[in-house]
Amino acid sequence: MGIRRVQKIVFFFSLFVFAINSSLFAQNAKIKININRTIGHISQNLYGNFAEHLGRCIYGGIYDPGSPLSDKDGYRKDVKKAVKNLHVSILRYPGGNFASNYHWKDGIGPKDQRPARLNLAWGNLDSNHFGTDEFIKYAREIGAKPYLTVNMGTGTMREAQEWVEYCNSKPGPYYANLRKKYGHPKPYNVKYWSLGNEMDGPWQIGHLNAEDYSKKAHHFAHIMKLTDPSIKLIGDGAANFRPGATPYKWDHTVLQNLKNDIDYLSMHMYVGNVDSSYYDFMATPLAMVKRTKVVKGMIKEAMQTADRGNRGPIHIAWDEYNVWYRARGGSKMVGNHALEEHYNLEDALVIAGFLNGFVRNADIVKMANLAQLVNVIAPIFTSKTDMYKQTIYYPLQLFAEHVKGTSLNVAVQSGTYNTDKFKLGLGERSAKFKNVPYLDVSASYSKKNGQVVINVVNRNKDKAITTDILSQNNKFDGPFKVYQVDGPNVRAKNDFHHTPVKTQQKSDIQANGSKMTYTFPPHSFTMLIGKISTK
Ligand code: AHR
């Protein structure tokens, strides 16, 4: 063989290898939908959020009296518009860590008589000008259910009882009369109440061990339920996932001890790309799913011996989750600009991964609250004169608006990858995952209108994935709308004048009977919305 021929063969072989390893050749995958293969009802409470007295979440975010951008009540109008568009279903307040030293009576009545207090959790001063009445009004205006966390640090069960009375009792008793006196004769009917916040964490004011927490929470639950038997109670699952902590032991003890008292077990998770490894970071939602499945088993065990009357089983509330690692630690944790995290595209894909995980576990996860709403690890970021939507806003918005009804158990065939051992987040434990699918998928089906929504994260950083989407029993009915969140690269960020990462509507896909094909671009989130015929 001549030298030129060998050179030619080597050249074409190298080109072939390059093409395989690059985006020149798209990967292939299959998604199979069957509207009879279901997981459970998707609670609208999966699209919750959280507003804490922390940094500029409330003061300078939600609430900025005196600003030309605010309405007569002091709520920022531009922020409220963006919040409404986010379809927040349930809003948690007033903390977080702040709750463990919050005395709710400081935040009611004439504003000029409310005492300013040190915010011991987050190192600044709280004027108390935003309190229960301002929160409830805001929640109503944005169309969210209010969710309150009682103080189990420096607070007493009597204070918790009086708060339930203030919010939920008809005029008659003292605190309900006080609510009436302050202009709110009708009960607020706050349904969701959390028994403390992260009470296992050594950082929490008044933190406890699992046995002591269970005893204290049982007494709080008792007196709160005597005041309003219709409330739903959320007990603390473990938040301390630091090396050396025993989170599953905490969860198990609390579930066994509070199995007749609580309706949800609260869980929290913050992840981050601490080792600057895109693929490891993309796998972090799998840690949430793993924890969900382990705790689901514990709940099943606890329910075997529970005596709950007709209250149904305990569910999981992921009432804090997000990406949080850059604005974390030391001076970034305190003061008026605490926890101001600026999000990029890869963060938005991780949030889409969390949402996919919640939907795929919709039988047990019945509440989820992104932490938090404005400025503080948040989808909305303000200045005194402007605001913008961070990257994570977009998947959240799409899910909350469209993913409803029943969660489908989707069959997915796609390429996979393995991670090394990596840190899930700052100060968190390490994890390692095998066979992480490049395509992360969930789907919902609404019987009411035959609508199917398919949610797909393409975790592949460089390659598009051409995918056959098959309906296994009924035919697709008409074209599918395509909404896509992507950007020029995985580190792309938005700011006040620049929005490289946002939702874009692409051309519809024409389905052909039971099959349609779509190519998911690299590092993207795509939502497909259409119908399946039931005829
Ligand atoms: O969301 C920020 C903080 O994170 C919350 O106050 C606390 O509950 C968690 O540790």
Image (cartoon, rainbow, N blue to C red):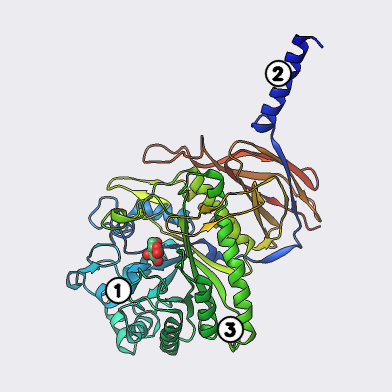
359 or 346: nearer the eye? 346
Q: Nearer the viewer, mark 3 or mark 1?
A: 1
Res 193 label:
none
Res 101 label:
1
Pointer 3 residue? 311
**Whereabouts is ligand 1, in terms of quadrant?**
bottom left
Label 1 SS: helix
- Rendered view: 131 above or below 427: below
Q: Quadrant of the N terminus?
A: top right
Q: Are marks 3 and 1 in contact (CB under 8 Å)?
A: no
The Cα–Cα distance between marks 3 and 1, rounded to whole angstroms, is: 31 Å
Q: Are marks 2 and 3 in contact (CB under 8 Å)?
A: no
- Nearer the N terminus, badge 3 or badge 1? 1
- Rendered view: 315 above or below 376: below
* Amino acid beneath label 1: Asn
Q: Residues within 10 Å of mark 1 (few under 14, many from 20)?
A: many
Q: Quadrant of the C terminus?
A: bottom right
Q: Quadrant of residue 99?
A: bottom left
The Cα–Cα distance between marks 2 and 3, rounded to whole angstroms, is: 70 Å
Label 2 SS: helix
